Image: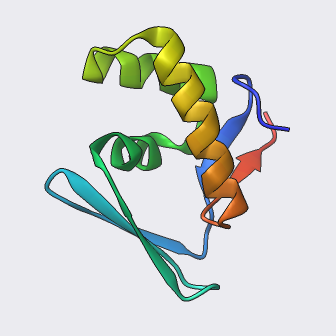
């Protein structure tokens, strides 16, 4: 179960590249590519397993000047989608 105290890292078989305000994630195992919006791109950039999802939500909230509850909810949802897609994995603290 993913919570705000979970830590997230991009999976080792995934390649990521930023193109201006968007990012592209390539899951080499599944031979799939995902195009991410600016906020999703930033989340992938900072998801290195060293910070909790709450810390990442705080960072994104500051950078994008958004409501903290909305950002936290969106980070949880998107982190779950990334894990389900095999793009990211939960990291033990």
Q: Where is residue 40 in the image (x, y as percent from the top left)?
A: 40, 46
Specify the farthest residue to the right.
1
14 versus 6 height, above or below: below
Q: Is 84 left, or right, of 46 in this rendering?
A: right
Residue at position x 61%, y 50% from top? Answer: 9
Question: Colour scheme used in the picture?
Answer: rainbow
- Say which quarter of the image contains residue 3: top right
In the rendered image, the quadrant that contains the N terminus is: top right
Camera-side residue of 85 and 19: 85
- Say which quarter of the image contains residue 42: top left
Residue at position x 34%, y 39% from top? Answer: 39
Residue at position x 55%, y 84% from top? Answer: 28
Q: Position of residue 24 (x, y in %)?
A: 34, 67
Q: Where is residue 91 in the image (x, y as percent from the top left)?
A: 75, 45
Q: Position of residue 27 (x, y in %)?
A: 54, 77
60 versus 39 height, above or below: above
Residue at position x 74%, y 47% from top? Answer: 90
Q: How many marks?
A: 0
74 versus 47 height, above or below: above
In the rendered image, the quadrant that contains the C terminus is: top right
Specify the farthest residue to the bottom.
31
67 versus 31 height, above or below: above
Q: Is 49 left, or right, of 67 in this rendering?
A: right
């Amino acid at each position: 179960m993913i919570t705000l105290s979970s830590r997230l890292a991009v999976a080792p078989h995934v390649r990521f590249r930023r193109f201006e305000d968007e990012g592209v994630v390539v899951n080499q195992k599944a031979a799939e590519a995902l195009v991410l919006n600016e906020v999703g791109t930033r989340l992938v950039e900072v998801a290195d397993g060293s910070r909790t999802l709450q810390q990442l939500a705080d960072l994104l909230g500051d950078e994008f000047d958004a409501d903290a509850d909305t950002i936290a909810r969106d980070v949880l949802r998107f982190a779950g989608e990334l894990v389900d897609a095999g793009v990211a994995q939960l990291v033990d603290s």
